[in-house]
């Protein structure tokens, strides 16, 4: 059977135009962008031009964009380095129970170093109550970290409301925007965020490149020490190859904001699933406040991993895991209060620019066979 890719939230193929933008940099410029001689000058240009394109997508000044190896490093950089800079004072971090592992594990690491972390709850749709965040604030709160769009169910959080609360109390706001950048508006001033993280491979660039926007006047302790690259905020020789690709991907993404064609296919897929399976299929996440490219559904009293195993040529992600014959519910769905009989059958289907209606119809057909 023809392979079908419905796992765009996990990673996206490199856009052909992005690959074309990378190709010249496989041979030149080969100099170190920071060396300051004739061979480094074109590499420096190849570094700063893409930085401007990333900044344009975020609506910020280019010198506030720090290139990283990806979204996970950007999350670590934002949370750990703020903590390290004020180790002499008590530190309190507020996040939610359903963040990306890069955020949750960073917070658990900070707890081992003495920080106090409050994990606010999410409701059954994946939204966070801003009043819970307000109530969690203490005089020692250093940063609030709330993901913009959830990677598993696609729920989009009201980050601007959280930003207002953070500003009222003089607290920094970090958001993992890896899934939202290039899909929905992510201008930093409109969101009100101080430290948004971006991942290149979520926006049709190659893996291994990402960025963190650092609002003016915020000082952080570098996570990677060495030379003074990236304005002294991250040591490591920059890659003109990867930054050129990332910049081109962000340039292309400007015309894809909202993704109406993809959203239409997502609606069609859900309609087909309801018609085929009725009350045997349940929707997970917020019905309206969600990414245009994400549909998380549960096949009630079934196991998502088993269903996907019967469709080896369909790439999608399951919310349950099987260990030694035991089914483990997705931590996110568990935190949202989804019952095991529903949650263990969860599958995340995520779509992209290459998704077609024919693929939608074909996957519904394969699901029908797999569940027979």
Image: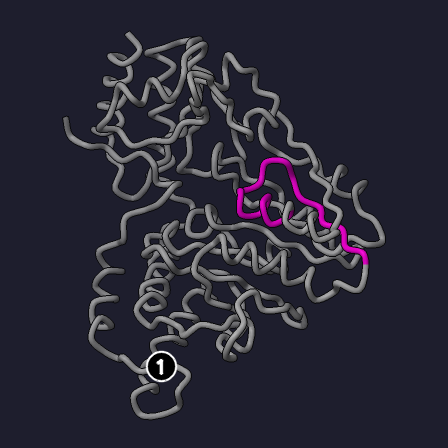
Residue 361 to residue 299: above or below: below
Q: Residue 84 appears at what percent x and percent y?
A: 68, 63
Q: Residue at x 33, y 65 (%)?
A: 242
* Left or right of 198 on screen, residue 49: left
Q: Residue 125 appears at what percent x and percent y?
A: 58, 27
Q: Residue at x 55, y 63 (%)?
A: 213
Residue 25 to residue 2: above or below: below
Q: Residue furthest left?
A: 1
Q: At numbered mark 1, what does the secondary structure look like: helix, strand or loop?
A: loop
Query: Residue 94: within the magenta?
Result: yes
Return the residue nearer the eye: 95 or 235: 235
Residue position for label 1: 32
Residue 303 to residue 144: above or below: above
Q: Residue furthest bottom?
A: 37
Quadrant for the N terminus, please. Answer: top left
* Left or right of 324 on screen, residue 95: right
Q: Which residues are magenta?
A: 90-107
| Residue 346 figure quarter | top left
Q: Residue furthest right?
A: 139
Return the residue nearer the eye: 267 or 331: 331
């Amino acid at each position: 059977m023809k392979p079908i890719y419905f796992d765009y939230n996990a990673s996206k193929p490199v856009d052909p135009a992005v690959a074309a933008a990378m190709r010249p940099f496989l041979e030149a410029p080969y100099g170190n962008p920071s060396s300051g001689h004739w061979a480094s000058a074109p590499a420096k240009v190849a570094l700063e031009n893409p930085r401007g394109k990333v900044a344009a997508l975020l609506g910020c000044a280019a010198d506030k964009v720090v290139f990283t190896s990806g979204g996970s490093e950007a999350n670590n950089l934002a949370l750990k380095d703020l903590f390290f800079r004020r180790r002499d004072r008590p530190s309190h971090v507020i996040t939610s129970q359903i963040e990306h592992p890069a955020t949750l594990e960073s917070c658990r690491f900070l707890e081992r170093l003495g920080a106090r972390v409050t994990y606010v709850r999410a409701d059954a749709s994946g939204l966070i109550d801003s009043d819970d965040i307000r109530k969690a604030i203490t005089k020692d709160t250093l940063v609030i970290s709330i993901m913009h769009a959830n990677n598993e169910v696609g729920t989009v959080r009201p980050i601007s409301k959280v930003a207002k609360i953070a500003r009222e109390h003089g607290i920094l706001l970090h958001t993992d925007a890896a899934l939202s950048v290039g899909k929905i508006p992510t201008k930093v001033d409109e969101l009100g965020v101080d430290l948004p993280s971006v991942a290149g491979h979520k926006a049709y660039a190659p893996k291994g490149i990402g960025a963190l926007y650092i609002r003016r006047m915020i000082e952080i302790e570098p996570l990677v020490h060495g030379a003074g690259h990236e304005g002294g905020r991250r040591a490591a020789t920059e890659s003109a190859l990867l930054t050129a690709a990332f910049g081109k991907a962000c340039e292309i993404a400007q015309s894809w904001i909202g993704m109406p064609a993809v959203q239409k296919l997502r609606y069609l897929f859900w309609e087909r699933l309801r018609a085929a399976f009725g009350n045997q299929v349940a929707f997970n996440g917020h019905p309206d406040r969600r990414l245009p490219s994400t549909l998380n559904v549960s096949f009630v009293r079934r196991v998502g991993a088993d269903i996907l195993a019967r469709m080896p040529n369909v790439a999608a992600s399951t919310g349950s895991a099987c260990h030694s014959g035991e089914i483990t519910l997705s931590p996110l769905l568990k935190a949202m209060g989804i019952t095991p009989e529903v949650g263990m059958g969860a599958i995340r289907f995520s779509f992209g620019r290459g998704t077609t209606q024919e693929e939608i119809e074909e996957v519904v057909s394969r699901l029908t066979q797999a569940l027979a």
